[in-house]
Image (cartoon, rainbow, N blue to C red):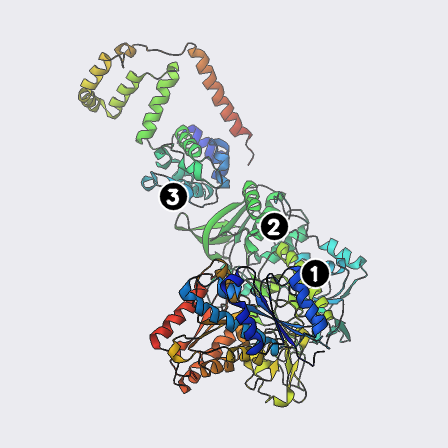
Amino acid sequence: MADEMKIGAYICKGCGIGERLDTAQMAQIATRDAKAAIAKEHEFLCNADGIKMIQDDIDNEGVNRVAIIGCSRRAKVEAFNFKDVAITRGNIREGVIWVRPDTDEARETTQDMADDYVRMAVIEAKFCKPPTPNEETAYNRHVLVVGGGVTGMTAAVEIAKAGYSATIVEKTGALGGAAAKSWKRIPQKSPYADPEDTGVADLIKFIEDSDKITVHLNSTLTKTSGAPGRFSADITAESGSTTTENFGAIVQASGYTEYDANQLPELGYGKSDNVVTQAELDAMALAADGGPIKTKDGKEVKSVAFVQCAGQRSDKEGHLNYCSGHCCSTSVKQAMYFKDQNPAIDTNVIYTDLRMPGAGGEDFYRSGQRKGVTFTKGCVTEVATGGSELEVKFKDLILNEDTSEKVDLVVLATGQVANSGLNIDEVGQDEPGEWKTNPESVLNLSYRQGKDIPQLTMGFNDSHFICFPYETRRTGIYTAGPVRRPMDMQQAMEDAVGAAMKAIQAVENAGKGRAAHPRAGDLSYPQFRREGCTQCKRCTVECPFGAIDEDEQRFPQFNEARCRRCGTCMGACPVRVISFENYSVDSVGQQIKNIDIPDEFEEKPRILALACENDAYPALDMAAMNRVEYSAFVRVVPVRCLGSVNLIWITDALNSGYDGAVLMGCKKGENYQCHFVKGSEMASVRMSKVDDTLQSLSLEPERVTTHEVAITDIERAPEIINEMAETIEKIGLSPFKF
Amino acid sequence: MSNLNQTMVEKYRNDFLNEVRANVEEGDWVNMCMQCGVCAGSCPLGPYWEHPPQEIFMMIRAGKREEVLTSTSMWMCTSCYNCIARCPRELPITHIMHGLAHYADRLGLAPKEQPTRKFANKFWDNLTKKGRVNELKLGLALYFMNGFMEGIKVAMANQKLGLNMIKTKRMNPMEIIGGHGVKDTSGLHAILKKAREIELAKAEEFKG
C-alpha cells in the first residue's frame, strides 16, 4: 500500500472558513496544482462525519497521505489521528482567517494565503511517508542506578515500587552516601521545628528486602554503551572482576563532594582542629549520639559560630561562584544539635543572606530563633587561631562595624561540588579503536561525543533547567540529586522520584520504538543515504544528544533510541542525506518552492517564516486566537527545531523569488529555552554564514533575520513578521521573480 | 550605677539578649527579628533616630547593653504603629520600644535630659497620684521643667490662653489644691503595686 502514493486533501469549511474563503477554488488547487488524487470540502471536518469521510477514503480508496486543511496542526490532534498514513496540516484558520481582517480590500491577499497553504500541505504530504516501525527496538525493564546515596537509593526504591528492577552501583563500601554520615536531616514534615532522622536505615532495609534491587558495592562503571532499551554496562568491582549487564535506562545519582576547605586558610581551616566543615560537624554529632558534642581534644563545645558562604557565592579565584542551597538550613539544623542538647550553648550563625528553601524553610528558621540560635548578618573576614579560643572576625552588616566573637568551634558552610565526571568539552573521546576506561569518568560512555554527560555550567550536568529539569543531553540517562544542581536531601529525594519515572518512560518508549521527550511518541527516526555521505562528521559532532556514533568505516551510526528527532543532523548535513519519513529537506524544501510567487508588477512580496514548532509556532497560534493581525504576504512553515533548518531552504527560497525570510527559534546560551538544548544555537551559528549566500546573490542582508521567540511572545512574533514586510517595502522586492 | 543596674549586670553577665527577653515588656520577641529592615523603613521619625528598631534588635543580640539602654532612640517612638502593622514576623515593635525605654528608665540608664522621658515621668507621677490627670499641675510642671526663670517666662507667654481657658470653664484654677481623683485611690495604688509584682515575677520565671 505504501508504495503507491495517493494523496487525499480535505478542506474544512467550519469555524468561519467557508464564509471567508473560496474553498471550491482551494479544492481545485489541491488537485490541479498540487496533484492530490482526491480533494473534498466538508462543513465540519473534525466531527464524526468528517472523520468518517476521511477514514472511508483511507479504507476504500487507498488514500495513504492525508492533507487536512483547516485548523493549526496544534489543534484537534486527537480527532485527526489516522493509523498508518502520513498526515499533514494546512493551517488556514489560525494561519489565515484569524490573522487577517474581514474586509473587501484584504479578501484577495487572504485568499492567496489560503491557496498557498493548500499547496504546501498537499506537497508536504507528497514528500512524507507513512511511518514504519523502527527495527531497532529493545525492551528491557531493568534500570541502572549509579550511586548509592539517598538519591540513588530513593530512585531504586521508586523503580522497584513501580514494578521494574534496579541495580545500584556504589563506589564505596556502603550505601547511604553523605546522609549516612549525618546525625540528622533537615525536617521534611510539618511543623518543621526539629531535625529528624535521616531515613537512611529505612531505605537500606527496603533495598535489602526487595528482590527487585541488586547492589554492587565497591564498584564503578568501566564502560557504558548502547542506547535506551539496550544499554550495556561493565560493572567492575575493586577486586578487578567485571560483570556486564544490560539495562533499559540509567539514573545517574553520583552526588557531590564537599568543597575543599583547605582552600580557605583565612578561615582557619587546617590551622586549627576546631575549624570544621558542615560534614565534619555532622560526623562529630553522629559520634556524640545525642550527648554533648566535643572538640577533638575532648572539650565540650560551649560556643560555636557558623560561617555561611565559606568559599562560595564568591568571585574569588578557586571559590564557588554559586549558592549551594542547603547550607543555611543545614547550619540551622546543626545549631539545633547544640541547642537541643544544652540551651546554654551559644550558637551564632553569621550570614550575608539567609536562604531557607522549601515549604518548611521559614518555619525551620523561626524554630531556630525560638530555640535561641542567634543570627548575625555579617561578613566573616578571618578566623584567628592563635589564642586558646578561636576568634571570628567579621563585619557586622547591620551595625556597619568590624567586630569579633570568641568561640570554641567554627563550622564552615562550604558548598557542593558536583561529581559529574569528565567535562567532555575539555576531555574529548578517545579515537575509535583506542577507547580506554578513564577512572575519572562516572559513566565511561563509549559515545562518540565523550565519556560523561555534558555539563551546562559550574560543573553541573546539563539538564533542561527551565522546562524539563530531569532531562539530560543523553537520552535514557537521567541525572538526579546534587550532580544536577546543588540541593538538600528533600529536594534530592524528589529529584530521584522524578528521574526514576523518566527512566521508566524511557524504558517503555525504547520498547515501542518511540521518541522520548519532547517529541514523545514520534515514530519517525533519522534515516541516511550512506552512499551520499562524505563522512564530514558534522552530524556526529552537532547532535545535541550525542546519539550518533561512528561505525568501523567512519560512517555515522544513528542510534535511533538515543535520538530525540529534532533534526539538527538534517540541518547540519551539507550533502543532505539525512531525513525522517515525515520530515526531510524535501518535505519542507518543496513546500517552499511550490507556493505561488506573483511577478514583481503585482507588488505582492512573499516572506518565508520558519517557526520552531515548540515556541514560535504556538506563539503565532495564540496571536491568532487573540486576532492579532499580521502581513498576508508571509508563509509560515513549522520546523521541529531551528537546528533542523538546512541552509538550502533559505537559498532555495531566495532563488525562487521570496523577498525575505524570518527564522524564529528559542533562546540560546546558558539560560537556553530550546527544547533540543543546542538547536537554536546551531541555527544561529549557521545563519551567521547566510550573509555569504546573500552576497553571492547580490541581495541585501536585511532580507534574512533570525529571532529568539518565547512561547509567551504573542505580540512580538506577529510584529517580527510585520517588520520584515516593512523592511521589504523599504528596500524593494527581490529581483529573483520569474 | 544604680543598685538595680548592678544586680542585672551581674545576673545576666554577657547575655543581654536574655536580660531583655526576661525584663522588657514583649522583649521575648527580640530573637524572632529577621533583620529585614521593614520597621526601619516604615518609621516616620526613622531619620531622626540614633538607631532604628532593626539596629536596636541587632545591638541587643550583639550584647551592646550600655549602648542600647542609654540610647535616645526608643524615646523617639510616637506609637504610630506603622512598624507593628508591617513587620512580617509580627513583632510588637512599638511595645518593645516602650518596654526598652521603661526598662532603661528603671535601671537609671536612660538619658536624663531626654524630653520624652521627662514628660513621661511627670505624666506617670501626676496620673498615679489620684488616678486622674491633673492638667493644671501637669502643665505647670512642664513649664518649670527647665528651671524656674524659664518656667516664669513660658507661663507669662501663655497668660492669655490660661485666662481664656478659665473663662470658658476649660480649666479650674482650684485644681492647684488637691484636685479631683478616682473614688478609691488606695485601691488604684494596690492595683499598680500588684502589676509591678507580676512583672517582676515574670522576669524571675523567665528561662531563655
- Out of A472 and A196, give the one closest to the viewer: A472
Q: Earlier in the sequence, mark 1 or mark 2?
A: 1
Kindly tell me whether residue A321 is visible in this rendering. Answer: no
How far apart marks 1 and 3 lie (CA) works out to 48 Å
How far apart marks 1 and 2 lie (CA) works out to 41 Å
On screen, residue A638 above or below B76: below
- Out of A689 and A321, give the one closest to the viewer: A689
The disc placed on residue A299 is 2
Are the numbered discs 1 and 3 placed on the same chain, yes or no? Answer: no
* Cβ atoms at labels 1 and 3 below 8 Å apart: no
* Cβ atoms at labels 1 and 2 below 8 Å apart: no
Disc 1 secondary structure class: helix
Question: x and y percent of residue B44 in the render?
Answer: 34, 38
Kindly tell me whether residue A528 is visible in this rendering. Answer: yes
The disc placed on residue B41 is 3
Q: Which residue is mark 1?
A: A155
**Dot 2 amino acid type:** Lys
**Dot 3 amino acid type:** Gly
